[in-house]
Image (cartoon, rainbow, N blue to C red):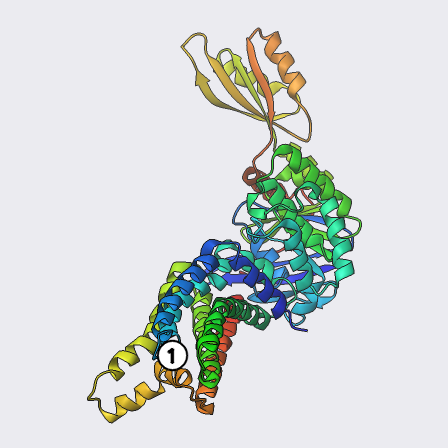
């Protein structure tokens, strides 16, 4: 049986031993509350579009910080040595760290369910786009965490890991969004932007469940987790 | 229990461990002795499957470190140098986590944690956060972790470094007590430590085994490399000649002359011929000559000096042939 859940549990617990989880939660609640003010207006459709649209920017900011220490800290403090000399595989380590972080993301999202309840009380929200919006967030979050985890595996420095993963996330998310916002765009670039994370994500928040988008996120997440496992293995067998 | 054969590790251009071979029998405590940078930690890291050997191999409890890494690690307790721990966790919680990693079920985790906590004197810090503990306690937490799954083989990298004298004594006693149940390989750069706890010492320098032997053999050769320092006031040459004539003295060197001309204190270093204590004879000689005696002291060799002597005399057991350079 895989030991990943054991590692995930420890990782998740350790977030709450430092201020980082609480700071992230507080920021998240304030920011999502402000975004919700947009949605929660008389005359507005009863939906969470603003929150979902805005959420991806928050993830670009916060996930590098939440994931920077996942492996970098283990290298820096030497706990990697005790971890990896226990009879477990690199896959357990990577999967465990990933799931631990994903667990924190779910906990961050949980309070926003309150907004759904409020919408239900005061209006008649279309529940479909809300569910697909949450699914989109989880999928984008997974991809971002796997990128963060990969960067964290390459260095002993948490700062380097955070900067590296933030750079990658900006490159795949904000840059295509910026280019895409230009009116005139050559066909090639338009097609490239359509493939990027931001475009695919907005489909979810619109309520469009496209199997291609789901596969895209699952696949890219898997690729980053896989190369992270390879990085750990190579470190060990160098 | 542990069989190492021509184990070699090369980091880039640096040859860290150079084809070492040795065996450790079941229940034995073997000390891995060497100055810093001798290749002790690298060897232990290879045996614990943390680093792959460049060439050569080893088996632990019959399992190959390369091909049966999972089985090796399941049969092994390892205390790395500097004792890395998750400082935000509580002692008991950490041990429980380690037990889960090792696939121990709840009842056995509970009973083993009770046992190792008791064994490593952690009872009164059981619920404390590891980051708030002193170095000595952290060392014990690491030791408790390595014992948790009752492994056949224990590998401890400098288990007493950073401890105060009382803790060092307690830890050595614990190691000695554990000797019967576990096969142990521990590294140290403290010579008396090996003499105190180990059944056998393997001396490693520059990545090679330079000597191995029992603590008694070690002690004997250590006495051989010791020297007696004599500080007295008298004419330097006369003192030197007088001391050289004392029976059992091999050679005398004058180290330094201190003070004003005329009443000068000089320090002479006397090397005895064999494992023979020459202090009494020296004291008598100095007094008979009427030279005021300030100090007479037996000085043990530093580890580096000891290695030089050991390799020169081949006094400790057999010197192993290194692999072809």
Q: Badge 1 is on which residue?
A: A49
Q: Which corner quadrant holds the N terminus of chain B?
A: bottom right
Q: Residue at x 37, y 75 (%)?
A: A39
**Residue A17: percent from the left, percent from the top?**
53, 54
Visible residue check, residue A46:
yes
Which of B210/A78 is in front? A78
From this view, report whether residue B69 is shown above or below residue B182: below
**Residue B184: percent from the left, percent from the top?**
71, 51
**Residue B61: percent from the left, percent from the top?**
74, 63
From this view, report whether residue B284 is shown above or below residue A156: above
Q: How many marks?
A: 1
Which of A231/B310 is in front? A231
Q: Residues within 10 Å of mark 1 (few under 14, many from 20)?
A: many
From this view, report whether residue A120 is shown above or below residue B84: below
Question: Which residue ends up furthest to the bottom in the rendered image?
Answer: A187
Quadrant in which residue B103 is drawn: bottom right
Q: Is residue A98 left or right of residue A144?
A: right
**Residue A156: percent from the left, percent from the top?**
44, 59
Quadrant in which residue B282 is drawn: top right
Visible residue check, residue A60:
no
Which of B80/A15 is in front? A15
| Element carrying mark 1 | helix
Q: Residue at x 42, y 64 (%)?
A: A29
Question: Which residue ends up furthest to the left in the rendered image?
Answer: A184
Chain letter of mark 1 equals A
Q: Residue at x 70, y 68 (%)?
A: B71
Q: Residue at x 71, y 44 (%)?
A: B120
């Amino acid at each position: 049986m895989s030991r990943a859940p054991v590692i995930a549990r420890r990782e998740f617990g350790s977030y709450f031993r430092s201020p980082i989880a609480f700071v992230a939660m507080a920021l998240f609640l304030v920011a999502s509350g402000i975004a919700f003010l947009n949605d929660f207006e008389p005359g507005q459709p009863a939906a969470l579009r603003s929150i979902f649209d805005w959420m991806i920017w928050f993830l670009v900011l916060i996930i590098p910080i939440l994931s920077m220490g996942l492996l970098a800290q283990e290298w820096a403090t030497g706990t990697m040595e005790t971890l990896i000399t226990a009879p477990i595989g690199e896959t357990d380590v990577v999967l465990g760290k990933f799931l631990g972080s994903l667990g924190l993301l779910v906990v961050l999202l949980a309070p926003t369910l309150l907004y759904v309840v409020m919408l239900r009380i005061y209006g008649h929200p279309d529940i479909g786009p809300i569910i697909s919006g949450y699914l989109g967030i989880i999928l984008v979050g997974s991809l971002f965490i796997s990128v963060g985890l990969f960067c964290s595996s390459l260095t002993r420095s948490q700062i380097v890991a955070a900067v590296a993963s933030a750079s990658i996330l900006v490159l795949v998310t904000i840059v295509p969004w910026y280019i895409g916002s230009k009116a005139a765009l050559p066909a090639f670039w338009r097609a490239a932007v359509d493939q990027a994370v931001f475009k695919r994500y907005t489909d979810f928040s619109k309520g469009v469940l496209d199997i291609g988008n789901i596969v895209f996120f699952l696949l890219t997440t898997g690729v980053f987790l896989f190369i992270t496992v390879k990085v750990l293995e190579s470190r060990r067998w160098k | 229990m542990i069989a190492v054969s021509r184990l070699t590790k090369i980091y880039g251009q640096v040859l860290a461990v150079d084809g070492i071979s040795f065996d450790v029998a079941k229940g034995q405590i073997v000390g891995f002795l060497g100055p810093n940078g001798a290749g002790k930690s690298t060897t232990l890291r290879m045996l614990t499957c943390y680093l792959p050997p460049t060439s050569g191999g080893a088996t632990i409890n019959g399992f190959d470190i390369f091909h049966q890494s999972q089985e090796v690690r399941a049969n092994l307790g390892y205390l790395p140098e500097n004792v890395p721990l998750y400082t935000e966790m509580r002692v008991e919680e950490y041990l429980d986590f380690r037990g889960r990693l090792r696939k121990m079920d709840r009842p056995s985790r509970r009973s083993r944690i009770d046992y190792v906590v008791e064994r490593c004197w952690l009872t009164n810090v059981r619920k404390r956060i590891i980051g708030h503990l002193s170095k000595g306690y952290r060392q014990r937490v690491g030791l408790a972790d390595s014992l948790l799954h009752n492994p056949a083989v224990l590998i401890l990298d400098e288990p007493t470094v950073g401890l105060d004298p009382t803790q060092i004594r307690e830890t050595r006693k614990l190691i000695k007590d554990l000797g019967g149940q576990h096969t142990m390989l521990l590294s140290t750069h403290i010579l008396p430590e090996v003499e105190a706890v180990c059944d056998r010492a393997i001396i490693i320098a520059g990545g090679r085994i330079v000597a191995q032997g029992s603590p008694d053999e070690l002690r004997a050769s250590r006495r051989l490399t010791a020297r007696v320092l004599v500080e007295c006031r008298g004419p330097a040459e006369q003192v030197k000649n007088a001391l050289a004539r004392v029976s059992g003295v091999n050679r005398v060197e004058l180290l330094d002359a201190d003070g004003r001309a005329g009443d000068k204190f000089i320090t002479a270093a006397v090397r005895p011929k064999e494992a023979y204590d020459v202090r009494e004879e020296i004291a008598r000689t100095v007094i008979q000559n009427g030279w005021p005696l300030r100090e007479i002291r037996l000085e043990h060799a530093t580890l580096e000096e000891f290695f030089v002597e050991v390799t020169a005399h081949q006094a400790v057991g057999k010197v192993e042939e290194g692999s072809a350079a």
